[in-house]
Amino acid sequence: MNEKYYKVLSAESLSPCTRFDYTPYLPNGDIVGDWLPLIDNAKLAEEGYYISKYWNMWYSKGARIYEVDFRYPSESPKFAVEDQICCGQIRLLKDMTDELVATLSDENFNIGKFNTGERNLGSHNTGERNTGNRNTGKLNSGNFNTGDGNTGIDNVGDCNIGSANVGSRNKGHSNTGDENIGSYNSGSNNKGNSNTGSFNVGNRNTGKWNIGNYNCGYFNIGEAPLMMFGKPVENMRFADIILPKWLNKPDLKSSFESATKDELQRTLQLPNFDFEVFEKITGITESDFERRLK
């Protein structure tokens, strides 16, 4: 085992939940305990032997903590802190109580400092059973989460896997909404990136129920046609368009004056280039181009 797991028992060697008596299976000095009876089809929230990497989440005063070996683990949660796992069979290796309890930092069973709450592994947490720092909530794995069951950093909500999500049950980063799979979505139930709306599958869609990319509206399939200067562009995709550098700056009139002649020529070669449309948007006229290119 790469990580150590533990079983917490009462002072009478009983399971805190089932009251099963572990006395016949206790280790004796350097001699490990016998394997407990096999439980077929062990599963969380059902039948099986429960163990945890985070013994302090289950410890109470007077309890005993045993390092364990295990077989046949069931599937673990997909998000948040793995506070415990369920196994088909375990054996107790050695009593670790005195050594581990000495690492507790306060009477609320925290391992860390300045926690407001209990059973945290980390510091400055408000809540319980967090493994990380400065979380507000419980069962967060990471830092600066507000909510419950997040894995990552700076999430506001519950059960997010990723970082900087505002909402719940997102898998990715910087989503605003719920149940997105991807990143930078604004809305809910999107599968992809940078969608604005809900139920989209793909990237950069605005609206709902689109399957594809760059669609604006509802129930579209495929990639929306590329529009430039108010007209569709044939045989080109959004990713094919590379604007000259000067068009990527906020003050276009200033950057126009410092743009190279090559950049200005490439501007005029953009698909469907139209001086009238360009002037209405930027304030830069055809005579301005003539002056700079003279």
Image (spheres, helix red, strand yellow):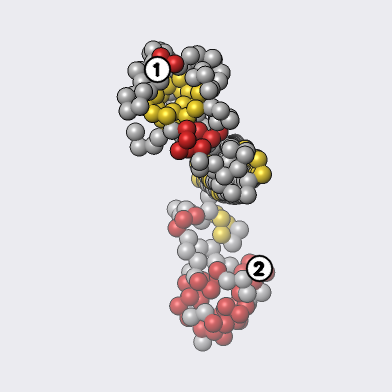
The percent position of residue 193, horizontal first and vertical second, equals 53, 46
In the rendered structure, which disc, 2 or 1, sits on the residue that comes first in sequence? 1
User: CA–CA distance between discs 2 and 1?
Assistant: 79 Å
Observer able to see residue 15:
no
At x 58% / y 30%, what residue is drawn?
61
Q: Quadrant of residue 210?
A: top right
The percent position of residue 100, horizontal first and vertical second, equals 47, 38
Q: Amino acid at mark 2?
A: Ile
Element at label 1: helix
At x 47% / y 72%, what residue is drawn?
266
Binning the other alpha carbons within 10 Å of mark 1 as few (below 14), some (14 to 19) or many (20 upward) gives some
Q: Is residue 29 above or below residue 147?
A: above
| Quarter of the image with the N terminus in it | top left
The percent position of residue 3, horizontal first and vertical second, equals 39, 37
Element at label 2: helix
Q: Is residue 32 left or right of residue 169?
A: left
Q: Which residue is mark 2?
A: 281
Q: Is residue 195 above or below residue 289?
A: above
Which residue is nearer to you in this view: 74 or 55? 55
Marking on residue 25: 1
